[in-house]
Amino acid sequence: MAITQVSLFLMNQPGQLVDAIGAISYAGSNIRALSISETNDFGILRAIVTNTDRVCDQLKEKYLVTRTQVVAAKMDDKSGALYPILAALNGANINIEYLYAFTGSGPDEAYVVLRVNDPEMTEQILHARGIDTLSDENLNL
């Protein structure tokens, strides 16, 4: 099952990031992965967090918050580990809009977060090739 990514739109100004991270912390959430992209006027903070509902409730008062279903595929933390994932999805004509990665709790464990056009099909393709994916329940353990 796909995981929920929380996205915040932040003005590209000093203090916006620290305020947003403070709000996530105040909600008692652990940030598992974080990505920030920017334009001249605003940034998009994308985060995989524990306690997604609580985080969204905390942030919606001050920020434009969206939830997106993404796939987090497990891979070895070594050179070349991303290629089989991308090759499998390319072969199935799955479009990847963006991705970012984070290390897992094991010594050689990593994950790639994929925003794709079809999360359910993506997970089926990956699971058929023996590639595990995370669920929201896994994140809250």
Image (tube, rainbow, N blue to C red):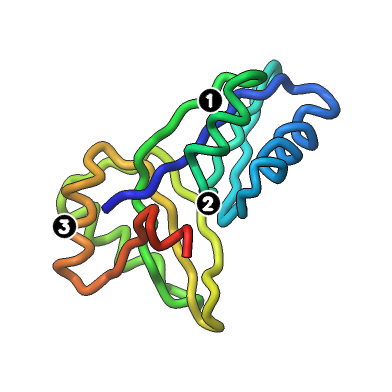
Q: Nearer the viewer, residue 92 or 123?
A: 123
Q: Residue beneath label 1, please?
A: 65
Q: Residues within 10 Å of mark 1 (few under 14, many from 20)?
A: some
124 vs 54, left or right, is left
The residue shown at (39%, 35%) is 68
The answer to which image quadrant residue 23 occupies is top right
Q: Tell me: residue 85, above or below residue 57.
A: below
Q: Secondary structure at mark 1?
A: strand
Q: Tell me: residue 78, above or below residue 29.
A: below
Q: Residue beneath label 2, please?
A: 50
The residue shown at (75%, 34%) is 17
Q: Amino acid at mark 3?
A: Gln
Q: Tell me: residue 20, above or below residue 119.
A: above
62 vs 15, left or right, is left
Q: Amino acid at mark 2?
A: Thr
Q: Tell me: residue 59, above or below residue 32.
A: above
Q: Nearer the viewer, residue 115 or 106?
A: 106
User: In whole angstroms, how far apart are the C-alphas of marks 3 and 1?
Assistant: 28 Å
User: In whole angstroms, how far apart are the C-alphas of marks 1 and 2?
Assistant: 16 Å
Mark 1 or 2, nearer chain start: 2
User: In whole angstroms, how far apart are the C-alphas of marks 2 and 3?
Assistant: 24 Å
Q: Residues within 10 Å of mark 3 (few under 14, many from 20)?
A: some
In the picture, the disc for residue 48 is none
Q: Nearer the viewer, mark 2 or mark 3?
A: 2
The answer to which image quadrant residue 67 occupies is top left
Q: Nearer the viewer, mark 1 or mark 2?
A: 2
Q: Which residue is outermost to the right?
A: 14
Q: Residue beneath label 3, please?
A: 124
Mark 2 or 3, nearer chain start: 2
